[in-house]
Image: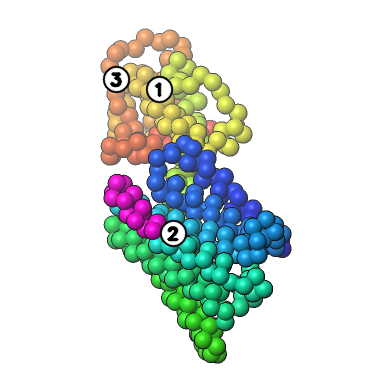
Amino acid sequence: MTGLLFSAFILDLAVVWKLIQLARDPRDLPLRAVTLCLICTRASFALGLDSAARLVDNLMGPGSARLVQNALLLGAVYCLMCVYLFSAEERERAIRRARWDALPLASAITVLALTTVATPVSVRGRDFATADVTATPVALFFMAALLYLIYALAAALWWTWRHARMSLRPLSTGLWLTVGALAGMVMANIGRLAIDVTRWRGANVPAWLNHGTQGLLALAVPVFIVGVIYSGAAMRLASARVWLCHRKAYRRLRPLWEALHEAFPQDALSRVPASGWREFLSLRGTHYRYYRRAIECRDGLVRISPYLAQQGVNDGTPHASLAGHLRHALRAQANGEAVSEQAVAVALPGEDSLDADVRQLISLSDALKPHAHAR
């Protein structure tokens, strides 16, 4: 029971998260499909609980819970297929194809409704494990559901395969994992269909078919989950590495920034100080603060460069020596000593990029540390 409640909680969080994202971008078709898929999955999951199933059966008649639960499951698989369809095809063409693909879904749900009505009340089961598939209406019910699952999963497999061929890593890696998982799900549902047909005919199901189908599903489901989250997790990991690098660089620039900021406070891009804890907890703000500090350090070096030029400093001056000249220049500037307008470029990067520029500034900042000066 604890596991079911935890799964329901995770699904609820996912639904709320996607609804918030959809409110921000309602025209995003793949996001719409994902949101509807999660909503259908969550509703189908709820009907798997005895209390919810009894409530629906009492309101709508015996077997209604099983009908609605399976219809929601088919709807979830249809939305899953649309996710990859909308990702791989041009918008208008994908919408037309999704409308056509809704016809098999409607047909399958119609068959489910008709077979439920045709099933005697005494044999209308709700649970897959206890359903009497020797009764023809019950067997047709499950066969129709499985046939649509096979069709929708195969279509999702096709669109995912197409999208994977056009994608680059890390997205393609996750998509290829999903392709393998969907192929396993298609084969597993074909096996389930064969099992139901065998039971309907009154024959014994071979043990290898039963165990093989269960094993294939047990393998395909976790691989599918990994495939779905792989690209997002990989990008989040890459973003985390960039965040950590920017956070470290921001902290290492502090000695240089403090020295220049004290001399030229008017160059600050933001006059509002932030607490250390707020800076640490604000993940997005780390990148902004990193760029801001690098720009302020470079602006400060430009302002102090006439004092450095007066000392004969040039771009080839080692950072250890440059740090000493910079201290002397800052004292001269603070004392208001006269200086010419001649400027000099210092600590220039070897390539035209901000990160290369920051590496030079960090090297100079490290040389400015008190313990570096003491040595």
Q: Which residues are magenta?
A: 90-103
* Residue type at tag 3: Ala
Distance in Å between CA atoms under marks 1 and 3: 12 Å
Q: Position of residue 144 (x, y in %)?
A: 47, 70
Distance in Å between CA atoms under marks 2 and 1: 68 Å
Q: Residue at x 34, y 33 (%)?
A: 347
* Residue type at tag 1: Gly
Q: Position of residue 15 (x, y in %)?
A: 55, 48
- Circle 3 — which element? loop
Disc number lying in front (3 or 2): 2
- Circle 2 — which element? helix
Q: Earlier in the sequence, mark 3 or mark 2?
A: 2
Find residue 106 and name its label: 2
Label 2 crowd bin: few (<14), some (14–19), many (20+), radius 10 Å: some
Q: Position of residue 221 (x, y in %)?
A: 51, 67
Label 1 crowd bin: few (<14), some (14–19), many (20+), radius 10 Å: many
* Residue type at tag 2: Ala
Q: Residue at x 51, y 66 (%)?
A: 114
Q: Nearer the viewer, residue 360 or 243?
A: 243
For the N terminus, the quadrant is bottom right
Find residue 343 and name its label: 3
> Residue 55 appears in which quarter of the rendering?
bottom right
Q: Is residue 91 above or below residue 334?
A: below
Residue 50 appears left or right of 80: right
Specify whether residue 105 is in view: yes
Q: Residue at x 58, y 37 (%)?
A: 281
Disc number lying in front (1 or 3): 1
Q: Residue at x 53, y 78 (%)?
A: 136
Q: Nearer the viewer, residue 130 or 336?
A: 130
Residue 334 on the magenta span? no
Q: Residue at label 1?
A: 300
